[in-house]
Amino acid sequence: FFADLAPVYLDLIAGCGRNVVFRAGQYAFREGEAAERFYLLRAGAVALEVHAPGRAPLTIETLHPGEVLGVSWLIAPYRWNFDARALEDTRAVALDAVCLRGKADADPALGYALMQRFVPEVVRRLQATRLRLLDLYGPPADAPRA
């Protein structure tokens, strides 16, 4: 995710990180909680889920190694919009959002570099959510068109 970033920025980002493990079934975060960190997945799988009253959780997307878990840390009011549940034992690097936002505020070039990486991810997630909802609530393929 940060592979082509300048080494000085990689060092700044690494200073905000630590290794974490989520056991299968454990939540990395829950909808509505403060988005105080985000994760770079190293091993395992995590489901992004949304809940509706009276319904089972709906998996919007499943994330795998090499992907970023959590984009809400970058956008005020810094609250999670989904639940993130480990589907299997998962290893990740947790990055402290407050630490990284502070470094980005102090260095606008770093902030811009982060935005260049995260905005496309936000757009991709919105598109994935849209397609998933169309699959669930759209008309059947054999339905007559008006």
Image (spheres, rainbow, N blue to C red):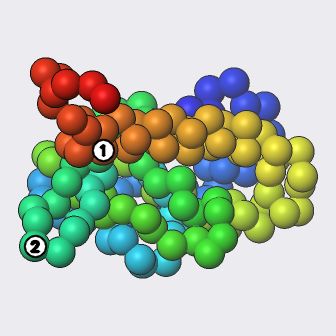
62 left or right of 56 in image: right
Rendering quarter of residue 96: bottom right
The residue that appears at 30% across and 52% down in the rendered structure is: 48
Residue 46 seen in this snapshot: no
Question: Picture coordinates of residue 2 (x, y %)?
Answer: 62, 34
Q: Quadrant of the C terminus?
A: top left
Question: Picture coordinates of residue 105 (x, y %)?
Answer: 84, 63
Closer to the camera, 50 or 8? 50
Q: Residues within 10 Å of mark 2 (few under 14, many from 20)?
A: few
The residue that appears at 49% across and 77% down in the rendered structure is: 34
SS class, disc 2: loop
Residue 133 seen in this snapshot: yes
Q: Residues within 10 Å of mark 1 (few under 14, many from 20)?
A: few
As displayed, is residue 25 above or below residue 124?
Answer: below
**Residue kind at label 1, given as amino acid type:** Leu
Rendering quarter of residue 97: bottom right
As drawn, the label of residue 133 is: 1
**Residue kind at label 2, given as amino acid type:** Gly
The residue that appears at 77% across and 67% down in the rendered structure is: 102
As drawn, the label of residue 143 is: none
Question: Picture coordinates of residue 93 (x, y %)?
Answer: 44, 50
Which residue reaches farthest front?
Answer: 146
User: What residue is pinned by disc 2?
Assistant: 54
Q: CA distance from mark 2 to mark 1?
A: 17 Å
Q: Are marks 2 and 1 in contact (CB under 8 Å)?
A: no
Question: Picture coordinates of residue 6 (x, y %)?
Answer: 78, 31
Q: Quadrant of the N terminus?
A: top right
Closer to the camera, 91 or 131? 131
